[in-house]
Amino acid sequence: MGEPITIKLLTSPTCPYCPMAAEVVRKYVEKNRDVIAIEIPVNTDEGLKEALKFGIRGVPALIINDETVMFGVPKLSDLERVVERLRAS
């Protein structure tokens, strides 16, 4: 196994979809021990910095290994596919 995969989940306290996205990420991390997930609210300095860095204007947004961005509530299968592609590269 290579480097661990890092998923940053940008959320907002008022976002109705963010808890669903967090649940998908949680399920994925449970099945994949080499994946680290961090939830970062965009109403914090760190969250705002990440959003600006990646040009993110809406949440939920997932930043995977600081290179791939997914918007909205991902399907578990889509998240798996993106992470597998990153692992292979």
Image (spheres, rainbow, N blue to C red):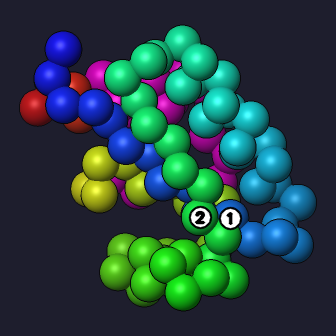
Identified at 54% across, 87% down, the residue is 45
**Which residue matches tag 1?**
11
Q: In this view, does 84 lie to the left or right of 61?
A: left
Residue 12: % across, % down: 75, 71
Within-10-Å neighbours for mark 1: few <14, some 14–19, many 20+: many
N-terminal of the pair, mark 1 or mark 2, is 1
Give the structural element (helix, strand or loop) at label 2.
Answer: strand
User: Which region is colored magenta?
Assistant: 68-85
Q: Is residue 16 left or right of residue 68?
A: right
Residue 38: % across, % down: 53, 50
Quarter of the image for the N terminus: give it: top left
Within-10-Å neighbours for mark 2: few <14, some 14–19, many 20+: many
Q: What residue type is labelled 1?
A: Thr
**Which residue matches tag 2?**
40
| Looking at the image, residue 73 lies above or below residue 27 | below
Identified at 83% across, 70% down, the residue is 13
| Looking at the image, residue 42 lies above or below residue 68 | below
Query: Pointers 1 and 2 in contact (CB under 8 A)?
Result: yes
Q: Which amino acid does label 2 sit on?
A: Ile
Front-most of residues 45 and 22: 45
Quarter of the image for the C terminus: give it: top left
Identified at 45% across, 23% down, the residue is 80
Residue 58 appears in view: yes
Residue 17: % across, % down: 81, 54
| Looking at the image, residue 13 lies above or below residue 82 | below
Between the residue at mark 1 and the residue at mark 2, the CA separation in whole angstroms equals: 6 Å
Q: Is residue 83 left or right of residue 28?
A: left
Residue 67: % across, % down: 26, 56
